[in-house]
Amino acid sequence: MSRTQRIGSDVVASLLAHKPRAFLMMLGVAVGVAVLSAVIAIGQGTRARLLQLVETHNLDMIMVRAGGDAQVFAPTADRGLTTLFPEDTRAIEKEIPNIEFISGTQNKRGINLVYEDRSAVTRLFGVEPNWAEVRHRTLSEGEFISSADMASMARIAILGHTVAKALFPQGGAVGRTIRVENEPYVVKGVFTEVGSTTEEDFDDRIVIPYSTSARRLLNRPFLEQIVLRVRDTNLIPETAERVRDLLRVRHNIGQGRPDDFFVREPQDVADTASKTPKMLFALMAGISLVALIGGGLVIMNLMLIAVSQRSREIGLRRAIGARTGDITQQFLLESVFVALIGGVVGVAIGLVAAWGLDAAGLVVSRITWLPFVVAFVACTVVGLVFGVQPARKAAHLDPAASLSGRAA
């Protein structure tokens, strides 16, 4: 048996001979790693969700909302602000370069839909034919709003996937006549399912021509939004600024006065969605770091006690030829080994906790290789850093004093 193998065997035998002490040393590290692993898994899941959210809100889309407050995500209630009009849409389309598609948009919550004995309450959007291109919305069946529909103020509707399922669970919605606020509308198409976030269900909606909503259903001209798709995403900040400048002029907003609209860029979505998670993750990472340091201190103190208790064993090993480096190596390996076992247990606990919170709908988590790598590195560092002092103390014990029982 080589010297390294013998040292490894001694490490395992020592830990097995002192199980309660090994368990206590492992426990402190396991707590820290569990918190760290859960934070990483939740962080990975939240990051993936954030990217999905930004993509859902479109990376090439600028949105102008009525009202001067910074309303990044959809408001939770209709606000009835009258600061955007179709003329603003046409001015932006005519005067701002880098715009590929644009659509004025009206919307209203609490719209009642009925088909035979089934009903639904949803959110209505009155839009122009380019709206589907701006929002990258495709249809699973039927057709989208046409220019002819706009010109004739047609009573036609495009249903979101959720609404279509509620009214037509067996399918076959296209061509059927539903009642929208007790008025007949023919279903012209059904959107492909998009999905939802914690902020909004993008399939729970009905879309009709803007002319129909403005002159028939809602009977008002003002817009809630203007959405526009850019040709070159690298020019989004510049394009957004030009839109702001144009609308300030059109709305006669003097220098120093606040806007009566809000121009939202894709980066606004990312910044807002990540603001709270970043603060939370920083806090949780700090807690896990404190827990790891605490676990390292537990390892160091228990091993210092163990050095005193095992002084005769150390003296005997030195007397039969063990070198100072062998003793140092053994105690460092014990420290690292215990920390790594604690890390394995901690990763398992942390990932199970993250999975459980995800299953309960409280957070979004994603299991990747990253927690395992971080745990391995963190535990190795903790084991080495906090095992140095006990290892040095053990290696420098006087063999004669240790065998006679007079070790400090």
Image (cartoon, rainbow, N blue to C red):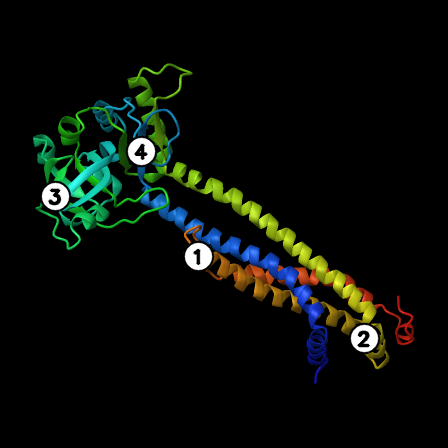
**CA–CA distance between discs 1 and 2?**
48 Å
Relative to residue 372, is residue 173 depicted above or below?
A: above
**Label 3, on which residue?**
187
- Secondary element at tag 4: strand
**CA–CA distance between discs 4 and 2?**
73 Å
Asked whether the residues under the numbered discs 4 and 2 touch, taking CB atoms below 8 Å apart as contact, a structural biologist would say no
Q: Residue at x 62, y 52 (%)?
A: 289
Which numbered circle lies on residue 63? 4
Labels 1, 2: front one: 1
Which of marks 2 and 4 precedes in the sequence?
4
- Left/right of residue 284 with respect to residue 102 in the rendered view: right
Near-viewer residue (113 or 234): 113
**CA–CA distance between discs 4 and 1?**
30 Å
Other residues around mark 4 within 10 Å, as few (<14) / some (14–19) / many (≥20): many
**Label 2, on which residue?**
323
Asked whether the residues under the numbered discs 3 and 1 touch, taking CB atoms below 8 Å apart as contact, a structural biologist would say no
Identified by mark 2, the residue type is Arg
Identified by mark 4, the residue type is Met
Identified by mark 1, the residue type is Arg
